């Protein structure tokens, strides 16, 4: 058998959607809210499926075929290239560094993300994303509790951020937010919370060089504002896997680039644009007024669709 190097742990498996659904929480409705909790724009639909990272990794792990030989450990420097090296080693990828060069190095954004899970399920009028002036707060049901996140500009990091300190700052920063937000932050505990600077990667025009290919954050680390980073990493891995099963390697890599580069680079841009709008400071009153108008239009359209049935 030819040698295939898979660097990193973010490779998707197939056939676990049912299990993920069973272990995730469906979020059917939510809203974009003012800090007070007042909805600016309500959203309803088929629902989003929220699943925690450790749970998703556990389920992906169960889908890996028993014939796969695993070697666990940090890889740096890279071993000699095998038949194919897949860089699935995240935002600070050593594969990207070695094959795409220094200019492809990830950069810290000015934003900090503080997040965690607390006991208790949020009531529907509390679910959604709260947009303030230069800061956001998100709240959604999770399995066994509520998933929350906060993001704002900060000088901390970029590498090690003290979680207890970040929670303290978040509590005072969001002290004028709705009681739902304040209750969550009062319950938040450093052991079930994370605090980190958000990093992104610069644009890449291709995700393969010779017999080396990138997937996930190694290829396109984006801000979390659209919640697409892990989803796109899974799609990359599944796309690459199927193409390699169907075509010779050079054709498979060319087709992978064609299918994945444009879409993920556009999402990378859209995500940071969304981040700039969500975390706006000076333009915040205008932004809120526009979203309020959009929210009224959406509500009228829904009403009309409801009455015409
Ligand atoms: C605050 C925040 C919120 C987010 N929210 C969402 C969301 O709601 N929805 C969503 O879809 N995405 C979200 N994301 C993005 C998501 O976390 C990433 O896009 C996703 O984890 C990328 O997966 P990956 O496998 O490419 O990289 P990673 O998850 O970073 O995995 C890389 C793996 O490679 C290993 N590794 C690294 N270097 C080496 C090495 N040299 N040798 C061996 N192993 C190595 C690491 O230990 C790790 O296991 C969020 C990100 C952040 C920061």
Image (cartoon, rainbow, N blue to C red):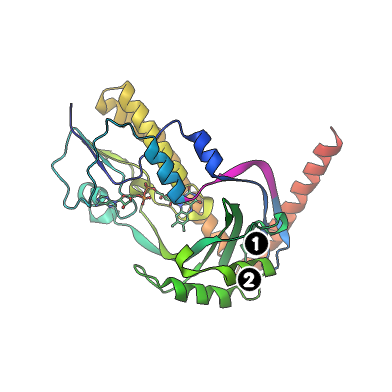
| Residue 265 visible, this orientation | no
Of residue 24 and residue 245, the one placed in the foreground of this image is 24
Marking on residue 182? 2
268 relative to 40 in the view: left or right: left
Between marks 2 and 1 in the image, the one whose residue lies nearer the viewer: 2
Image spot of residue 36 (x, y percent): 70, 68
Of residue 198 and residue 262, the one placed in the foreground of this image is 198
The reply to whether the magenta stretch includes residue 308 is no
SS for dot 2: helix
Image spot of residue 87 (x, y percent): 28, 44
| Residue 272 visible, this orientation | yes
- Distance between the alpha carbons at the discs numbered 2 and 1: 24 Å
Say which label, 2 or 1, has the lower sequence index.
Answer: 2
60 relative to 9 in the view: left or right: right
- Residue designated by label 1: 287
Image spot of residue 98 (x, y percent): 20, 50
Label 2 neighbourhood size at 10 Å, few (<14), some (14-19), many (20+)? some
Q: Quadrant of the C terminus?
A: top right
Question: Which contiguous range is marked in magenta?
Answer: 43-52
| Label 2–label 1 contact, CB within 8 A | no
């Amino acid at each position: 058998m030819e040698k295939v190097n898979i660097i990193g742990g973010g490779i998707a498996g197939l056939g676990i959607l049912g299990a993920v659904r069973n272990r995730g929480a469906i979020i059917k409705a939510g809203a974009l809210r003012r800090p007070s909790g007042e909805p600016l724009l309500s959203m309803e639909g088929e629902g989003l499926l929220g699943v925690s990272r450790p749970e998703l990794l556990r389920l992906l792990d169960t889908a890996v075929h028993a014939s796969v030989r695993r070697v666990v450990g940090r890889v740096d420097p890279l071993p000699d290239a095998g038949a194919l090296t897949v860089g699935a080693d995240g935002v600070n990828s050593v594969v990207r560094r070695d094959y795409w060069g220094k200019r492809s190095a990830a950069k810290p954004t000015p934003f900090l993300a503080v997040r965690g899970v607390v006991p208790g399920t949020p009531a529907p009028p509390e679910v959604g994303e709260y947009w303030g002036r230069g800061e956001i707060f998100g709240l959604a049901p999770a399995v066994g509790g509520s998933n929350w996140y906060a993001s704002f500009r900060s000088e901390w990091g970029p590498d090690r951020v003290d979680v207890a300190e970040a929670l303290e700052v978040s509590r005072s920063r969001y002290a004028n937010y709705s009681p739902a937000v304040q209750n969550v932050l009062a319950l938040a505990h450093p052991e079930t919370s994370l605090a980190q600077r958000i990093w992104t990667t610069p644009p890449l025009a291709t995700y393969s060089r010779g017999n080396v290919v990138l997937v996930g954050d190694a290829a396109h680390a984006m801000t979390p504002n659209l919640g697409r980073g892990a989803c796109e990493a899974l799609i990359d891995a599944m796309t690459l896997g199927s193409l390699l099963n169907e075509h010779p390697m050079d054709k498979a890599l060319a087709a992978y680039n064609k299918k994945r580069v444009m879409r993920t680079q556009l999402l990378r841009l859209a995500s940071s644009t969304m981040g700039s709008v969500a975390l706006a400071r000076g333009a915040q009153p205008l932004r809120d007024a526009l979203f309020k108008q959009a929210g009224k239009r959406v509500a009228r359209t829904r009403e009309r669709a409801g009455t015409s049935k």
